[in-house]
Amino acid sequence: MTNAAYEGFLPGLHPIEGYGAGGFRFAGMSHRGSLLVSPSGISAISPVRVQELDAGALESLLNAPRGAVDLLVLGTGQSLVVPPRALRELLRAAGIGIDPMATGHAVSTYNILLAEGRKVAAVLLAAP
């Protein structure tokens, strides 16, 4: 149920209003599937497992000016999944910390950090 005007990217900072049933609600819209949420906006991404996350999926985050994001909150699905070493090293090289957790916790953590004005981004993998 994606808003037709959404087309895979919504610019700007937006809290996540809800999640579940394989999707998320934000900015009065709903999206089924995974998201990359960054200071530049919210993007639909195709990875559905932590092991599928790579530089291509995180391109807009990795191309942001250094220091624009200090921490990536990684929602790994229904339960915590430790991200692969290659992903952790990719983010470290970009100067971005990573905090993996179940997606439900990641949504809450992202929203709190966003409200505090922190330089935060999130990858939220959809959970059934």
Image (cartoon, grey):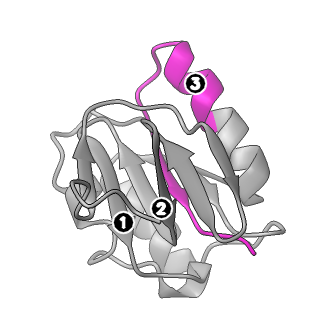
Q: Nearer the viewer, residue 67 or 77?
A: 77
The crowd level at tag 2 (other Cα within 10 Å; few <14, some 14-19, many 20+) is some
The crowd level at tag 1 (other Cα within 10 Å; few <14, some 14-19, many 20+) is many
Q: Are marks 3 and 1 in contact (CB under 8 Å)?
A: no
Q: Are marks 2 and 1 in contact (CB under 8 Å)?
A: yes
Is 7 included in the stretch rendered in magenta? no
Q: Single out the mark in the foreground, 3 or 1.
A: 1
Cα gap from disc 2 to disc 1, whole angstroms: 8 Å
Residue 99: mark in rendering:
none
Q: Which residue is mark 1?
A: 44
> With respect to residue 91, does 106 lie above or below?
above
Residue 113: mark in rendering:
3
Q: Which quarter of the rendered picture does the C terminus lie within?
A: bottom right
> With respect to residue 112, does 1 lie above or below?
below
Label 3 or label 1, whichever comes before in sequence order: 1
Q: Which residue is mark 2?
A: 31
In the picture, measured across the screen, residue 6 lies left or right of residue 79, that is left
Q: Nearer the viewer, residue 114 or 3?
A: 3
Q: Nearer the viewer, residue 32 or 84?
A: 32
Q: Examine the rendering and report whether any part of residue 72 can be seen.
A: no
In the picture, measured across the screen, residue 107 lies left or right of residue 9, that is right
Label 2 or label 1, whichever comes before in sequence order: 2
Residue at the far right: name it.
Answer: 79
Cα gap from disc 3 to disc 1, whole angstroms: 21 Å
- Magenta region: which residues? 110-128
Say what amino acid the circle numbered 1 marks: Ala
